[in-house]
Amino acid sequence: VSLAVDQAIREIIQPVVERSVTIACKTTKDLILKDFAHEPDSKLMSEASRLMVTKLAGNLALVTCKEPLRTSIDSHLQKLLTVVIVDGPNSSAVIKDASDNAAKENLDLGCMLIEKAATEKAIRDISEQLRAALTIRERHAASSSATPGKPKPFFDPTYQQANAAAMQYAPNLPPALRPSAGGLTPMQRKLYEAFNRLPTHRLRMAPNRGASAPSGVDARSQGNAGSESQSWDSATGTESGPAPTASVGESTNGGASATFAPSPNAEGQPSTARQANVDFKKLTGLLQQLRTAEDHIIATAKGDMERALKLAEANPDVRSILQIIRSMVETIPASATAPPAPLLQFAQVVFNELVRLRLESTLHFQLRLAVLRQLRPSTGPVATAFVKEITNFLIAAAQDPKATLQPRKHHALTVGLARTQLL
């Protein structure tokens, strides 16, 4: 199966990624240059372009690759199985059924890998395409700081050069769509921030209702792996991008996630100026509160996991717990190079619960993933180090004979952690 998936991905990934990235970068570049024509902030422009291009490229790649990838996996696996299965009265039906189920079972993971490749290339390409515009803004900032006083008005000549034909139509645009002389407007800022909240990956892990359950990962374990229609943390980001806010609602994978400015603390200073305040005892108390909330939600839903997930998404206690956890993590200074020991200790506790959970416990599984996602520091070396620790937890669990990590659960854990940018 892995060989068939690998061959299928290699077969379609290049044209899918090239097409998706080309369209996403062209769209992003044109809109960014227009909206930021009078905006001198290079960092704001860079983050907005990354947010937009990753969502566009990732979703275009998903739409483009889903059916061709399923067909290709099915075809390659049938060829491979034909070689190893002895001819018999029902051999062709067995091969067709096995290849069809395996293609459905592995489709989502293959799509996720292609989406990741597309978003990574899109970030590189848009950075290159906007390099001249960003350099102009950096020079303007340096010039303004060298001559303090009244701010100098800014206009990006790159916009005029790249959109000479479109410039004549600019006066006919509605006021909200025209380049603003004062820079990015509040409405435009909210628009680009909204890309941060869009779910990146909406493909269901479970096979079609009409299909028989595959022998490897069944529908329940695949649902546990992290369907985006039942997500518990904000839009995820790459390791180089800041982590999400603590709101419950979106997840993703592969997109560049960023906020436009650091959240101020009570004193009005950026949170990175504070000392890390990660309390293991308080975190374990919050986890116990989460367990209590889960029991209440499941009792209200009368054991119906789909209903329980919907109830939990709107549950104020669950939201509050995740927000408190995130607020503690945000006290870690940006200059930190390693996660605080209490943070890793608590992450290990949460991960161990994930390993012990039954695959049927969809609500518990999703919420533990959400807690781990909130524990991931914002950006920089400390975020990278945290992801490596989670990866090591998974490797150790897979190699530990006492953990009894079955293949289905290992698959669900791997996909769930990968989707939330924790591997």
Image: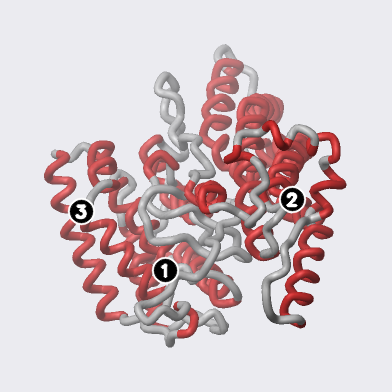
Q: Residue at x 66, y 53 (%)?
A: 181
Q: Secondary structure at mark 2?
A: helix
* Name of the residue lying farthest toward the front: 150
Q: Residue at x 42, y 19 (%)?
A: 210
Q: CA distance from mark 2 to mark 3?
A: 40 Å
Q: Quadrant of residue 157?
A: bottom right
Residue on which the image places disc 1: 375
Q: Amino acid at mark 3?
A: Glu
- Decide which of 288, 44 is in the foreground and name it: 44
Q: Residue at x 41, y 50 (%)?
A: 409
Q: CA distance from mark 2 to mark 1?
A: 27 Å
Q: Amino acid at mark 2?
A: Lys
Crowd band around label 1 with a 10 angstrom C-alpha radius: few (<14), some (14–19), many (20+): many
- Mark 2 or 1, nearer chain start: 2
- Does residue 114 appear to the left or right of 300 in the view shown? right
Residue on which the image places disc 3: 294
The image shows residue 261, relative to residue 412, as above or below, that is below
- Mark 2 or 3, nearer chain start: 2
Residue on which the image places disc 2: 121
Q: Secondary structure at mark 3?
A: helix
- Decide which of 392, 300 is in the foreground and name it: 300
Q: Quadrant of residue 340?
A: bottom left
- Decide which of 185, 298 is in the foreground and name it: 185
- Decide which of 13, 88 is in the foreground and name it: 13
Residue 143 locus on image (x, y percent): 78, 76
The image shows residue 301, relative to residue 42, as above or below, that is above
